[in-house]
Amino acid sequence: MTSKNLYQNKVFLITGAAGFIGYFLSKKLLDRGCKVIGIDNMNDYYDVELKHARLQQLEPHSNFMFVKGDISDKPLVNELFEEYKPNFVVNLAAQAGVRYSIENPDVYIQSNIIGFYNILEACRHNPVDHLVYASSSSVYGANKKVPFEESDFVDNPVSLYASTKKSNELMAHTYSHLYKIPSTGLRFFTVYGPMGRPDMAYFGFTDKYFANEQIKIFNNGDFENDLYRDFTYVDDIVEGIERLIGHPPVDEVPHNVFNIGNNKPEKLMTFIGTLEKALTNALGREVMFEKVFEPIKPGDVPATYASTDKLQNAVGFKPETSIEVGLQWFADWYVEYYNKK
């Protein structure tokens, strides 16, 4: 059975629908004829215009309904569940960013803890077929064993952001145990692509280049022991989510956790070199960033590397978009969107 048939006449509630992953997931579901209720608080953590641009792509769909609001607003969340009776809930609303969590801890507790609690309570009182929620690769902390597997010990987070995501997994497990809510947590690994988040390094580096500014690289200039990241293209993330939505856990405690990563970590300097080449291709002139090397920042981890065996065994899929392909799509979009030709 195709996912189009599987989800026909089903209602999806997507939180964070104007966000990067939320937008791409909403668009794919709408293209399949699904009904999508989107909620987003449209905060100014990064350029709100980009969020509006994403929404403009979704609003022509007759099956799309958007609500501007915050999931930390419990009466609003309850009202949405009671009015639209979603079959599937995908919670992507969260305050993101490791470094920002050191400067502004309050917003992480508000959105990632209280907001997620409100979603769980709403699912408890308005039963759903499946709750899928965003966790993060940051829950692995500074684990030395790679690749990271879902069964690994994850009780040593190194940022408040990571702590909130680990808390989400514990909260969801408890609600699944007590109220039999089928729920699945997704540990995303460094998601990138067109219309992405400007606070992410690849986007920020590109902004700096066009502003004639230096880029800061937090690896001490140590190329031998460079930071490694499992960069995952956004379409692969969405494909993984879409497949897993139709596979709710059926265990006695119906809760599960999956990595969604590229299973192919790249050195940060290799990633930067690939981005320079992609921009060179997009612009038709050579692009070289002016680089400054600084110490690693508090809360950053030296490496992320996903094992995708569990995902592949469950739904027959693993992310495979190379950084050469993914970054070229990003560079082409950036040059056109910001009119940089």
Image (cartoon, grey):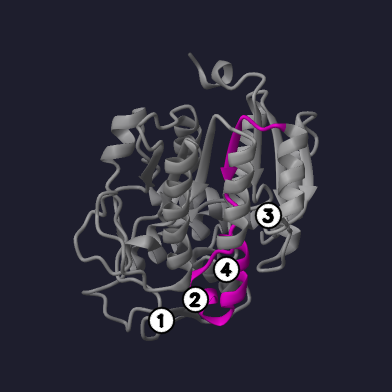
Secondary structure beneath dot 4 equals: helix
Count of numbered tags: 4
Amino acid type at circle 1 is Lys
Q: Distance between the residues labelled 4 and 2?
A: 15 Å
Residue located at (36% from left, 81% from top): 296
Residue located at (74% from left, 41% from top): 80
Q: Earlier in the sequence, mark 3 or mark 4?
A: 3
Q: Distance between the residues labelled 3 and 2?
A: 23 Å
Residues at discs 1 and 2 in contact (Cβ within 8 Å): yes
Amino acid type at circle 4 is Ile
Q: Earlier in the sequence, mark 4 or mark 2?
A: 2
Magenta-colored stretch includes residue 317: no
Label 1 belongs to which residue?
A: 297
Residue located at (35% from left, 56% from top): 230
Q: Earlier in the sequence, mark 3 or mark 1?
A: 3
Q: Distance between the residues labelled 3 and 4?
A: 12 Å
Seen in the picture, residue 28 relative to 38 is either above or below; the reply is above
Seen in the picture, residue 169 relative to 206 is either above or below; the reply is above
Q: How far apart are marks 1 and 2 (CA)?
A: 8 Å
Quadrant housing residue 231: bottom left
Return the mark for residue 99.
2
Q: Which of marks 3 and 2 is nearer the N terminus?
A: 3
Magenta-colored stretch includes residue 105: yes
Span colored in magenta:
85-112
Q: Which of 188 and 172 is in front in this view?
A: 172
Q: Distance between the residues labelled 3 and 1?
A: 30 Å
Seen in the picture, residue 227 relative to 82 is either above or below; the reply is below
Amino acid type at circle 3 is Ile
Q: Is residue 210 left or right of residue 320?
A: right
Label 3 belongs to which residue?
A: 71
Which callout, 4 or 1, points to the residue nearer the camera? Answer: 4
Residues at discs 3 and 2 in contact (Cβ within 8 Å): no
